[in-house]
Image (cartoon, rainbow, N blue to C red):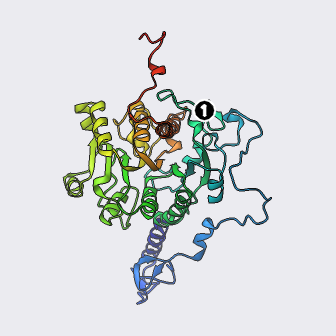
Amino acid sequence: MKFSVSLIALTVAALVAVPGTIHAQENSVNGIPFEWAPWKDPNNPNVLIYKDSKDDLFARRDTSDDPERQPGLFYPNRYVTGPLWNSIPTFMGAPIAMSPEDLVAGEVDVALVGLSIGDQMLPGGRFAAMKMRSLTDYLFYPFQGTDQALGVDISELVVADYGTIAANWMADNQTNLDEVHKVLSEIINAGAVPIGIGGTHIQSYAFMTALGQKHGPGEVAVLHIDAHYDAYSKEAGNFVHNGSFFKLAVDSGLLDGAKLHHIGLRGSTPDYKDLKWMRENKLRFHFQTEIEKDGWDAVLARLLGELKGMKLYVSFDMDGVDPAYAPGVGTSEPGGLTAEQAIQLMRAVGIQNEIVAAEFNEYNPFLDDAHQSTGILMDRLARSLMAGMQGRREGIEDPLYFDPERILHNGGDN
């Protein structure tokens, strides 16, 4: 759409520069003939027309000539184990799944899937998934590790890298949501939990449509960690964009407003009109000012109380964290959760709630520091969520549980 507007502007500028050379025509919009702007619908200039070739980037590869293999997970690396820098990059060193059949045969618990829609004010989110597979990190492959708060081995979960979902970077990002919905539905219907890595926040709408289709509209609660409430009424000509998707989800009945829980809100919005809409739709929200006033422990307890017993989708915008810990975001806002608070929150909801989906988005690797602090934190947040999920499977019930072995020492003497 931006390309279209720019081209129209250039054409108008040309007409102004050479007055009288082109006469007004009935079959035109703003004086521009439809033949010059074939993406415009003559019956409705607000409708964009796409060529069929827009789908080329979403065409699935014909695998009929590939070497025959049984469905299941496969490991791309030569060695049994080693540091990630010696590996063919995958998310967290996980094995690869390419189809729903692989997910089912591999009995996958969690499918890590890359997201590449770019809808940021400062572009870069489309490169996050690629960066997250190749972080400068000291950890080992294959997927492994013991969570030092819970004492659980996260490799007990069967985790796979399900590739990156295609996005047409030249198209209206609303059209890219179809492919995100399609791939997420593959994962969900195969019995795995999708955890999205990278991209931008507009893709959350496709998570909600996929979850609504599986569980029913309004049945899944959303935990939204963000500096911004992302229900802006200013549409900019779109039904959904990077900051408005929750409004359409609530207004359309896809999401029950009373099951939308925000934390970390700060910045210059919402205003009183938007707050009125949030209250009328029974949204639950915890501004950063509440944390400053009452303390993290009190607000965390309230939030967990609100979420108890719900099927939960976690939507984590990295700007929900203080930029002191996560500088690599496109809409940075001072303040926010600390890294420690964010990690604790992920562990806690992983234990307490049935996690049906999650995503960690809005990481812009071009804006990160030299140590890739934002990328490292995003990796640890996803690992902490999965540690909580594994702790839940092992019978841990207290969302604020700590492994006694990590607290007591010297034979039990503190």
Side of 244 where 94 appears, left or right: right
Q: Residue at x 42, y 75 (%)?
A: 16
Q: Is residue 29 above or below residue 217?
A: below
Q: Is residue 130 above or below residue 98?
A: above
Question: Residue 287 placed where, x, y %?
Answer: 27, 41
Number of marks:
1
Question: Residue 384 placed where, x, y %?
Answer: 48, 36
Q: Is residue 252 above or below residue 328?
A: below
Question: Residue 158 placed where, x, y %?
Answer: 60, 44
Residue 350 visible, this angle: yes
Q: Residue at x 78, y 61 (%)?
A: 66
Q: Residue at x 51, y 28 (%)?
A: 151
As helix, strand or loop, the secondary structure at mark 1 comes to: loop
**Front residue (pair 199, 23):** 199
**Front residue (pair 384, 54):** 384
Q: Is residue 217 above or below residue 152?
A: below
Give the residue type at disc 1: Asp
In which quadrant will I find the C terminus? top left
Question: Residue 178 placed where, x, y %?
Answer: 50, 66
**Front residue (pair 312, 132):** 312
Side of 296 where 82 appears, left or right: right
Residue that badge 1 annotates? 137
Residue 269 visible, this angle: no
Q: Residue furthest bottom?
A: 26
Classed neighbour count for the residue bearing mark 1: other residues with Cα under 10 Å, few (<14), some (14–19), many (≥20): some
